[in-house]
Image: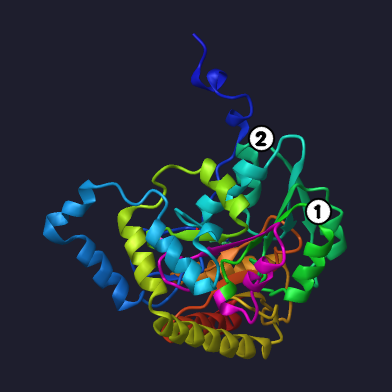
Amino acid sequence: MPTPSELARAHVPALYAYTPGLQPTDSGWVKLNTNECPYEPSPRVVAAIQEELTHGGARLRLYPSPTSAPLRAKIAEVHGVTPEQVIVGNGSDDILNLLVRVFGDDRQSTGFTFPSYSLYPVLVAIQDGGTEVIEFDRSMRLPVDRIAQSGARAFFLTSPNAPTGVGFTNAELRAVLNTFPGVLVVDEAYAPFAEENAVPLLAEYRNLVVVRTLSKAHALAGMRVGYALADPETIGLLDRVRDSYNVNRLSQVAALAALSDASYYDAIIGKIKRTRDHWAGEWAQRDWFIYQSATNFLFVEPRNAAGESGPAVAESLFKFFQSRKILVRAFPSHALTASFLRISVGTDDEMLAVDEAIQAWLTNAP
Ligand code: PMP
């Protein structure tokens, strides 16, 4: 009898699963490792979920809108596009997966930069597709010409970038769109914290797809809602490969309520940006190199008390943080990222705890 692995599609046993940032199950952590929002979602979100659960949860008996129709309409209104230009997913990971299913190909490659969101190569590998990786140099500026010449069928660009936090301008995105002949997927998970976003470019470029999430700025990572804005033809293709009920009932109402409370979110986004800029300034005074962040996290290259930086220094601080139940993200596997730590912007108290830990590390580290 053949084993399940022998019966599986040939490339599957060799796949490696994406490892998300640690989600500890015990309490007491200052959790700044997955760029979640440190503040609660809008009270309207909680009220909408409670309302959906009335009558003993009777509405849960019924399937949700298969297309998330009311939510598509709301998203269209928020961004000034038509509902035919919107698709909603079970988190933006779902949307990214749909894009790879449609455009990823085993003969033509899917492109992305390094560093960027490390899920892209995993999704491409699941489809047994080829990849084209364009590495940034330390400036982390957009290598427009290399993307244009990448030969990729679709290119995934995290903008603002993760894990560096560097924002790209629409002038840079235009330069790519004017020269790259494939589909440009701009993953805007962190765009609410940036000065510019690519949505206005949709009116000009049919091959542009903008991907958003409610996991970061909207404090709904636990509800799993993301969406894409694109040309109606692209949305039609994505709808063909989507699960029929890909967004559950509670997530649909929660997202609708969140997108109906812009003033609440403007306030917390403003607060997060002020906190970010304050601590970037403080740590830069320690002579740490920090990329200018257009996101809700800081990518910092720490220096120890002897003024040294590098992978061992980053690892030392990472471990010291952990000993104090502070969780941040390290990227040790590549020279471009190994001497850095990514710290999500938390509440004032959380950031003070981080700063106190840094001071203690500087005093105690060998
Ligand atoms: N894109 C980027 C760049 C991200 O950092 C993340 C969060 N890890 C996502 C997409 C996925 O977000 P979600 O699936 O929660 O919408």
The residue labelled by disc 2 is 128
Instruction: Name the amino acid, label 1.
Output: Pro
Q: Secondary structure at mark 1?
A: loop
Q: Quadrant for the C terminus, please.
A: bottom right
Along the line of sight, the residue nearer the viewer: 332 or 131: 131
x and y percentages locating residue 301 in the rendered image: 69, 75
Given this view, does label 2 or label 1 mark the residue nearer the observer? Answer: 1
Colouring scheme applied when the structure was drawn: rainbow
Q: Are marks 2 and 1 in contact (CB under 8 Å)?
A: no
Q: Is residue 193 magenta?
A: yes
Along the line of sight, the residue nearer the viewer: 173 or 70: 70
Q: Quadrant of residue 55?
A: bottom left
Above-or-below relation of 98 to 11: below
Along the line of sight, the residue nearer the viewer: 141 or 152: 152
Along the line of sight, the residue nearer the viewer: 323 or 155: 155
The residue labelled by disc 1 is 181
Sequence order check, earlier mark of 2 and 1: 2
Tell me the CA gap for discs 2 and 1. Answer: 22 Å
Q: How many marks?
A: 2
Please give the name of the residue rendered at 42% of the width and 48% of the height, measured from the top-left corner.
246
Magenta region: which residues?
192-221
Instruction: Name the amino acid, label 2.
Output: Asp
Q: Secondary structure at mark 2?
A: loop
x and y percentages locating residue 1 in the rendered image: 49, 8
